[in-house]
Image: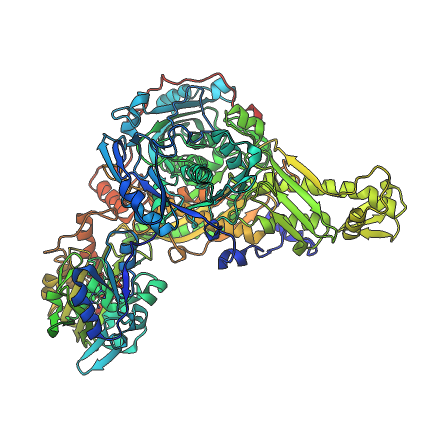
Amino acid sequence: MTLTEDEMTQTAPDSTLEIGKDRRRKEDQRLITGRTRWTDNLTLPGMLHLAMVRSPFAHATITNIDKSAAEASPNVVRVITGADVADEQGGLPNAWPITPDQVTPNHPPIAVDRVVFAGEIVAVIVARSAAEARDAAELVDIDYDELPAALDLKEAAEDKVLAHPELGTNKSAFWRFDSEEAGTGGNVDQAIAKARTDGIVIEREYRQQRLIPAFMEPRSTVVDPTGEQITMWSSTQIPHILKFLLAAVTGVSESKIRVIAPDVGGGFGGKLQTTPEEFITFLVARQVGKPVKYTETRSESLMAAHHGRDQWQKLTLSAEKDGTVTGFKVELLADLGSHVSLVGGGVPVLGAFMFNAIYKFPAYQFNCQTVLTNKTWTDAYRGAGRPEATYAIERIMDELAAELGVDPFEVREKNWIKHEEFPFTTVAGLEYDSGNYEAATARAKELFGYDELRAEQKRRRDAGDQVQLGIGVSTFTEMCGLAPSRVLGSLDYGAGGWEHASVRMLPTGKVEVLTGASAHGQGHETAFSQIVADRLGVAFEDVEVLHGDTMVSHKGLDTYGSRSLVVGGEAIVKAADKVIEKAKPIAAHLLEASVDDIEFNAGRFSVKGTDQGLAMAEIALATFAAHNLPDGVEPSLDSDATFDPVNFNYPHGTHLCAMEVDTETGEVTMRKYAACDDIGNIINPLIVSGQLHGGLVQGIAQALWEEAVYDDSGTLVTGSFVDYLLPTAADTISFDLDHTTSPATTNTLGTKGVGEAGTIASTPAVVNAVVDAVRHLGVTDVRMPCTPERVWKAINDARGGAQAETVGAAAPHFDESTGMDGTVDRTSGGN
Amino acid sequence: MIPAPFDYLAPTTVEEALAALGQHGDDAKILAGGQSLLPVLRMRLNAPEVVIDLGKIHSLRGIRDDGDALVIGAMTQHSVVEHDPLVAEHATLISKAVEHLADHQIRHRGTFGGALAHADPAGDLGAPALALEAQFVIAGPAGTRTVAADDFFVDLFETAIGEDEILTEIRVPKHTGWGATYEKFVRVAHQWPIVAVAATVRVEGGTIAEARIGLTNMGSTPLRARAVEAALVGQPATEDAVRAAAAHAAEGTNPPSDLNGEAAYRAHLATVLVRRAVLSAAGTT
Ligand SMILES: Cc1cc2nc3c(=O)[nH]c(=O)nc-3n(C[C@H](O)[C@H](O)[C@H](O)COP(=O)(O)OP(=O)(O)OC[C@H]3O[C@@H](n4cnc5c(N)ncnc54)[C@H](O)[C@@H]3O)c2cc1C
């Protein structure tokens, strides 16, 4: 079901309901002023501080470490090397071995005899102050024998230089999905072969550059070992998973560990990790028996917190001459960096089901080779796998349109799933429950002024203007709301995807909501309060949302993958409904009526057909007092629920970007950005706008500005914000946003995830626009980020007769005969 | 990030500051707005034993009219220069350059003299200072001397200021009535320029009577585009004439290659930006 604009305006929102209100975020005052509990704000009595000594080399043998000068430095308590703790430090976990034969190097928190990326921790200083720890860190004298480093992804995939010589290969895992094998579609090679003789084949190779999540708050960890439990505060997205893994790795009983993620200043996937720094702080605190703090510097964060993306994508799309796509084959190389981190190997797999996007492709094959290199390890970054997929398909659909000489919407419309075809099982085996691409596209075109801008583009082309105009389309969808536990199991992921909630009715009628989701800037406290206020009929202000402390909200799977509302919010709904069910017999008893005659509406239990009733707060107090409860009823309304979704959900939208390209300098300037997203029902439009705006800018930044660059020796060149270019408000324009509504059918709120949508959608829209502006000059691709110099060179190359950076004829970059794994049906759980 | 330990001195007069410099020699570092020095200290790229803060020397702040020149105190913040009406009227080129220097916070702290003394070839003030033929007043143990802009910038991060000297003020000859444009080419707003052009011209009856052009980030120091200047004089302020003159923009330059562009690209940018800057300064566009 989809509501069009007209229908939506006809159903005026009920002003007594919280859901749908533009509530300002309750948490913002304390977060913005900083008068709150960031981990680094924490000071405990007798607390010691850590500084890390990090490797300047990408790959080297450690031949000697002289720590005597550091140990003699003022107020240094201890200097620890990897060799000192080799037996007890354990290894960092990999929770998602994507194949049974995945090659997974050991991952010691402190390097023992060899370093495998520049930034790896080699020694740890424990001192009485952070400044003294830093001073002493300068004094550790380390001898290295430099080794050749595997840096370039394609070369690493050929095992020319080994990142970990003892493993004998850089190839970690090969993962394939094939629609013919899965029974979800045909044979892709046959489709391509047929199109070569009687159709169109488009071959492209795209680069997903390496990105740095660059959350605002650098990572920080405090461990207090002095109580009965060891308490860790950490700037993490995943306190619950961290607790479990701390126990699993260190052997400390899970019941003796408490993890607190206090206020956390952003993550974008970058804090979906268990880090060497966390394990080291935990280890040192236990060794010295005192509280210990470690806070990274921004330079350390850029260098050693995990990076994202970094893929080569070789794509082959086959189509009939009328633009009907007959097959799509994807061959990826994914750079893991030095280690297979928590879920790093699985990130490309999260994209595997999305390359077919909103389209009805009859045949599809996805191949991915993950590769170890001597660079910072990669893992989730906003969108994780899905931006890569969306970029590939939305770029190549524009190429198909260009090849056919038609409007990019024409090939999309010809191939997309029509609204009346939902629910629809895709060639990748997912069941899309709802959506309406036609409606979103119509609205986006209207917002954008599509026809007018196309006319202007033509005028400028015809006039040969120095500044040309390009229009980029991205009709994206994504799978989010991670995730049905069964599906995760079928993909060999190490955990489930449910979420937990508790609703506690306090005697005064106030409500405490405990959620296993772990907010780090999203606004959960506000959105969840709105849900509970409506459900229980209490005031928005009377709901307190508690999270991020394993002692308070003991159960949960945390926040990532646009899951908190659609999975965590649904758990809260279910727990709140249980509160109502528990309250009904008590209300009936107090009102001297039969339970069957009790109605609950807007916070009031009343007897059908009478004006007799009691408010939720009155029932709460009566339950607390417990003086007069029906026989056999426990004196508590508190309720728990754990919700495991049966399916992902599938937000979609049509994004349109107009870019101006100065053909003289290559400078690109955004002229207009309009999007119509369908994220189902909306709890808080203001929060949704915030998520979209931030997400859009992050995706635009991949297209235009951000790239983590290493030099030939494996040193991160973009090691500060001078060189790693993050945009600010000054670099963006006002976006024109609207939405259509096709409620999700798999949660009672009808909501879909929005946290990653903007990022996933925007990158191809921008690059398509840049290419579109200069395609008539012969340019068919510009590598991201589209720097002025790259655009200028692409134009020059095209003018010089050479094809700009297309690599359609490149050889396959891995041996297709290896790693074939056709046994598992990885997708049926998605249905 | 935490700098290595240092002693901190805050003299209140130039004499005291010079004495402190004399005493500590190259163990000391002068602190102005700290917008370049503090990052260096915090990343531990430098570890002076003594930091001498000029912030309490009030005589180093402010802008005054001195007949045919403006005098800008070395410790005058960028934000003050940016909004100063004298600068806007008589040294428009500086106003235009400062407006796009870094962001509000940095302009509020960073100083005019500190930026010039720092002599980052990508800094936005060197090219305007060169183009306006500023004079640098430098105080030392033997008294005060004045250095012409052409002689002030020696190399990358190196100026004519001696180790025992302090830059006290910058004298900018008035260019009242000259058109001025600072063309700064960046990828994001808060970035140092990839290339920038400082152009100021005096147009008489449609003809360019005088032209001064400074280039930012086209070599190890800010540079004058003298070949362009010479080619412009006496020419009509038209697109074609300026284009022809601007073709000389990269002559004698030695631009760097980095993530934002190779030298050849910068050379190309210089010719484009010089043309645009001159045309805009001349009021042609
Ligand atoms: C994020 C960021 C972005 C920036 N972007 C730009 C930009 O786009 N364009 C630009 O031009 N600049 C930029 N800057 C630099 C800014 O202009 C600084 O203000 C300037 O470089 C240094 O001025 P300061 O007063 O802060 O000097 P300080 O940092 O205090 O000192 C700089 C150097 O000059 C020496 N020094 C200072 N004053 C004197 C003096 N009177 N006599 C002798 N030596 C002295 C110091 O010893 C030191 O070596 C940026 C800075 C930052 C942090």
Q: How far across and down, in percent of the image, does residue A199 sit?
A: 38, 26
Give the answer, above or below, for where A663 lies relative to A633. Answer: below
The quadrant of the rendered image in which ligand 1 is seen is bottom left
Image quadrant where one finds the C terminus of chain A: top right
Left or right, residue A635 beside residue A260: right
Asked if one can make out residue B125 in the rendered structure from this viewpoint, the answer is no
Q: Nearer the viewer, residue A235 or A320?
A: A235
Q: Residue at x 33, y 21 (%)?
A: A167
Image quadrant where one finds the N terminus of chain A: top right
Q: Nearer the viewer, residue A131 or A384?
A: A131
Left or right, residue A60 beside residue A48: left
Asked if one can make out residue B230 in the rendered structure from this viewpoint, the answer is yes
Q: How far across and down, in percent of the image, does residue B131 sit?
A: 16, 67
Q: How far across and down, in percent of the image, does residue A582 sit?
A: 78, 41
Give the answer, above or below, for where A43 lies relative to A171. Answer: below
Q: Nearer the viewer, residue A407 or A330?
A: A330
Q: Residue at x 28, y 76 (%)?
A: B58
Left or right, residue A311 beside residue A362: left
Q: How far across and down, in percent of the image, does residue A508 sit?
A: 74, 54
Number of labelled discs?
A: 0
Residue at the outermost bottom position: B67
Based on the displayed image, in which of its 4 quarters is residue B269 positioned? bottom left
Q: Give the image's coloring scheme.
A: rainbow
Based on the displayed image, in which of its 4 quarters is residue B203 positioned? bottom left
